[in-house]
Amino acid sequence: MAAIKSKDTKPEMQVRRFLHGLGFRYSLHRKDLPGKPDIVLPKYKTLIFIHGCFWHHHPGCKYAYTPKSRTDYWLEKFQKNTARDQIVTNQLGKLGWRVIIIWECEVNNGRYKDWIIEKIVKKIS
């Protein structure tokens, strides 16, 4: 699993290009924030996480399957990942940050563009 990229993934790069094209300026992977958010919009006190559907076990997504081998291991891993995501989101909220989660499947099917604009506008207003 060490070979799995955690930064600069294809979905993340697509979202970053899109936001940059809209004129948003951002920081990346700030280590001083819990969970090292993928994209930080400091002007709007907003954070964006681009979650992989498999690793973060996106509810109802076809990519969030459990492998057939070592099922117990994977179920425990997914539960820990989901619990960690919730803890990080709560910590960031307490620090006054708005958190946006974008799922890999949303980016891959192109639905994210209008959705991101709507989500950001709702969060920052």
Image: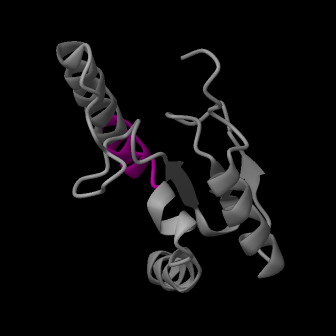
In this rendering, the answer to whether 36 lies above or below 10 is above
In this rendering, the answer to whether 34 lies above or below 24 is above
Instruction: Give percent across and percent down for residue 74.
Output: 27, 21
> Secondary structure of the magenta portion, mostly?
helix
> Does the segment drawn in magenta span residue 71?
no
Q: Residue at horizontal 65%, vertical 19%?
A: 3
Instruction: Give percent across and percent down for residue 56.
Output: 37, 40
Instruction: Give percent across and percent down for residue 125.
Output: 49, 84
Residue 122 visible at all? yes
Left or right of 8? Residue 115 is left
Give the farthest residue toward the left: 72
Instruction: Give percent across and percent down for residue 6.
Output: 62, 33
Q: Residue at horizontal 49%, vertical 85%?
A: 118
Q: Residue at horizontal 60%, vertical 26%?
A: 4
Q: Nearer the viewer, residue 66 or 43?
A: 66
Q: Residue at horizontal 27%, vertical 24%?
A: 80
In this rendering, the answer to whether 117 lies above or below 13 is below
Figure colour scheme:
one colour
